[in-house]
Image: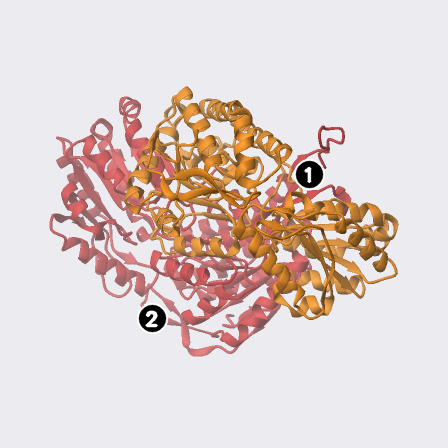
Chain colours: A red, B orange
Amino acid sequence: MISGQHFIAGRWQGRPLAHNQSFNPATNRALDWHFAEADLADLAQITELAHSAFQEYRRVSPSSRAAFLNCIADEIEALGSTLVEVVNLETALPQARVENERTRTCNQLRLFADNLLSQDMEIRDPALPDRKPLPRPALRLTQIPLGPVVVFGASNFPLAFSTAGGDTAAALAAGCPVIFKGHNAHPATCELIARAIDKAIRHCAMPEGVFTLVHARQHAFSESLIAQPKVKAVAFTGSVKLGMHFAGIIQQRPEPIPFYGELGSQNPVFALPDYLQDNLPAFADALIQSVTMGQGQFCTRPGLVFVVADTTYPGLCQALAERLANCSSGPMLTAKIAQGYRHQSAAWQQCAGVELLAQGQGEETGCHGRPRLFASDAEAFLQHPELREEIFGPASLLVRCKDVTQMQMLATTLAGQLTATLYASETEWKAQSVLLQELELKAGRIIAGQMPTGVEVCHSMQHGGPFPASSDSRYTAVGSQAIRRFLRPLCYQNLSDSLSE
Amino acid sequence: MISGQHFIAGRWQGRPLAHNQSFNPATNRALDWHFAEADLADLAQITELAHSAFQEYRRVSPSSRAAFLNCIADEIEALGSTLVEVVNLETALPQARVENERTRTCNQLRLFADNLLSQDMEIRDPALPDRKPLPRPALRLTQIPLGPVVVFGASNFPLAFSTAGGDTAAALAAGCPVIFKGHNAHPATCELIARAIDKAIRHCAMPEGVFTLVHARQHAFSESLIAQPKVKAVAFTGSVKLGMHFAGIIQQRPEPIPFYGELGSQNPVFALPDYLQDNLPAFADALIQSVTMGQGQFCTRPGLVFVVADTTYPGLCQALAERLANCSSGPMLTAKIAQGYRHQSAAWQQCAGVELLAQGQGEETGCHGRPRLFASDAEAFLQHPELREEIFGPASLLVRCKDVTQMQMLATTLAGQLTATLYASETEWKAQSVLLQELELKAGRIIAGQMPTGVEVCHSMQHGGPFPASSDSRYTAVGSQAIRRFLRPLCYQNLSDSLSE
């Protein structure tokens, strides 16, 4: 069922290697699927082909591009239960979650398709032939695709942010061919989705080379890929460290190109005293659910919770601890993620002034990770820079502040975030303009009274934020505006529409 | 009249130095105005102040910001003939040109003001409380300013792309304070404009630090300025070399920030055979006027003209030579620009296969430059990379091609351009989709049957293009869309409008 090959030039090619295996985190064992490894010698062919495809694909009409995106969605659905089973084997994500993510992935593709049919991004200034002292020519501003795009997907969204996920959908909608670097944590999933795209390419008679899947475990391949002159943009979801390493390589190119890194975020939650006093159980339910869902492997999981150490505080700690103690450890996406989570949990626990408030049940062998809730005071938080690093997994740090003023002060010390959340009573909302204004400078999305997990795919979503949440806060990774990542303006002056369309 | 001081924190400060003088290119002599030199020790104060101003200025209502921009325009006009005289002394640009540029500058400010009052950049997705399986929260996408912006102006537009030029107007409209690095070629002009802004700040009660003028001839100051953590974007107009040097410094920052470099362009013109045969005198008139106006010191001056070596070619050469021979040398903006122009002209002339077709009259002493027209065949153009470098001055290279196919081939070899122009008969337009499609990949603006000089300030203008025309082809330096350079999206989720406005 799984060939383990690359999909290049519309053909499945490459020889699977014995040691390049897929892995099942639930059993902590290798799966019996083997994958090819791309070679630096393949680079020129891959990017040349994407460039040739670009010349043709950028002139494909919006309606044909929309039909192509819809067809990809249909073909993904047609993979049926096989897809769900393979994703589950490779990621340990439960069936219901995989099915929901598949729905989201197909909806994303269809959202971009709908926009291609309905949205007009043109701006016009009509000719003013009689204007004095000089006439004005007719001017028309359009948006054209940048060229071939390299996409690196995310381990935590094997469908919605991987092979045919948000970046791929946005790039294909824009008119850019995609070179997708197969994700090492779910390569068989990548192959299945690429097979769906393969069918859609043939069904819609799209140019060969409009989509490439290439498997490569060696960083050297990825490093050379993003340095290729025919590559015109790179979208990456992953760690700050690897993302900024790739950004550095891109900066060495003779021609600068856009790099979109969706990197890391702690997603601070600020819960004000009056609100907490009146809503403690509901808040505790929501927080523990948000921290632990999907083993905490969401880029919007709340990793920092700021509260005031008032009379409500002990009750809050107790309510959170009780709820967390009922949660169980579960398999994380990869052994590396589980090790990183355990390592960072241990590092937090060793910080002076940080205590482990509660932890969930179960063992932490293999790929399993146990949920944890830490607590510290403001001083300890200020003292330990490691508490500001994203902890990727089911953990959160409760930071108790002397008062709201100290809470505001801590907000000013935060780095850039994908989200910032404020829970406040009606009275507190009206009084909290200082905190709100500070959070506006720190985040891409401000949320009132809801946990940050759950990212709506719509027109007005912003998934991105000041560095290091993302490398370019001007663009979103989620929602219809993501198409702007892969477009540039082109102005036609004094040119009749019929000639330039 | 000219104090020679910086404008920092709403105060005129700094001690003018004897050797930091303004210069008159028409007389090739120093002017009796002396200027202060900023110190690295001033940096923290300057950027801290801009950051403080940002906290206040970003919350100033759009209508108050619009009033501020309009007031700056009014105060610039109120400078009257003094401004025109000072610009003329520092740049040798004639009075009529300076007056036109002043009009354009004030119109730019007022265009951004009008847009602040009329444009709604928000996108909304209303709440769907009854949606299954999950309700949708209300989402609202706004645009917020990035923070303090450093602007480096252009020598060739001492008003429209300098102190209160396009970048400054766009940044102030966006809600970003501006730190303007005074231009060494027109520092007294910078001071006069800053005095107008000073008056507008006081009249409109804007925060001190919303605008800073700082004089610094040492690159070290500029290099440290753009590395300051409180600086959140940099806009630069100038050479590829200096622009990419600044880009490299910005890449070393821990936090990546946007860099907008408007760098260099040859603005190729393609004139097809049938068109030329029917329109030779008009084309020759337009080309020579476009190449020589303002001593060729426009970033959109046509520096390359591709034609077919058919029976019309000798007549074209003769028509162009006759017209150019009637043009005179004139003072260029600076001694350095004049030297660079003469140096590059000499280098072109020494290329094997390149001939000097014609030159204008007059001497080339001091800051003066003489117009020139060169010619080469396609082979010589392919052989000499120096012919692809922007020549900043009144010169152009006629490249004769064997046929239209060779012309198309040469188009594929071009680097990124601000503009690409096509002159063609109606029949040729219909047949020239290949050339047009190639030019779309190379330029930010495609022009039919008009010379590229003359950049309309409007909504649909794109002034920018693939590298090296600009460092970021996704943004424009001219027109109302330029405000996007200084904004980032912020999404409010589940937040009532009254709390976030």
Rendered position, B470 above or below A226: above
Residue B85 drawn at (x, y percent)? 55, 31
Which comes sooner in the sequence, label 2 or label 1? 2
Q: Amino acid at mark 2?
A: Arg
Rendered position, B123 above or below B348: above
Local SS, label 2: strand
What is the chain letter for disc 2?
A
Q: Amino acid at mark 1?
A: Leu
Write the residue at 16% across / 41% down: A378
How far apart are the alpha carbons under marks 2 and 1? 61 Å
10 Å neighbourhood of mark 2: few (<14), some, or many (≥20)? few
Residue A98 drawn at (x, y percent)? 43, 54
Residue A161 drawn at (x, y percent)? 46, 54
Residue annotated with mark 2: A29
**Which circle marks residue A139 in the picture?**
1
* Left or right: residue B42 compared with residue B138: left
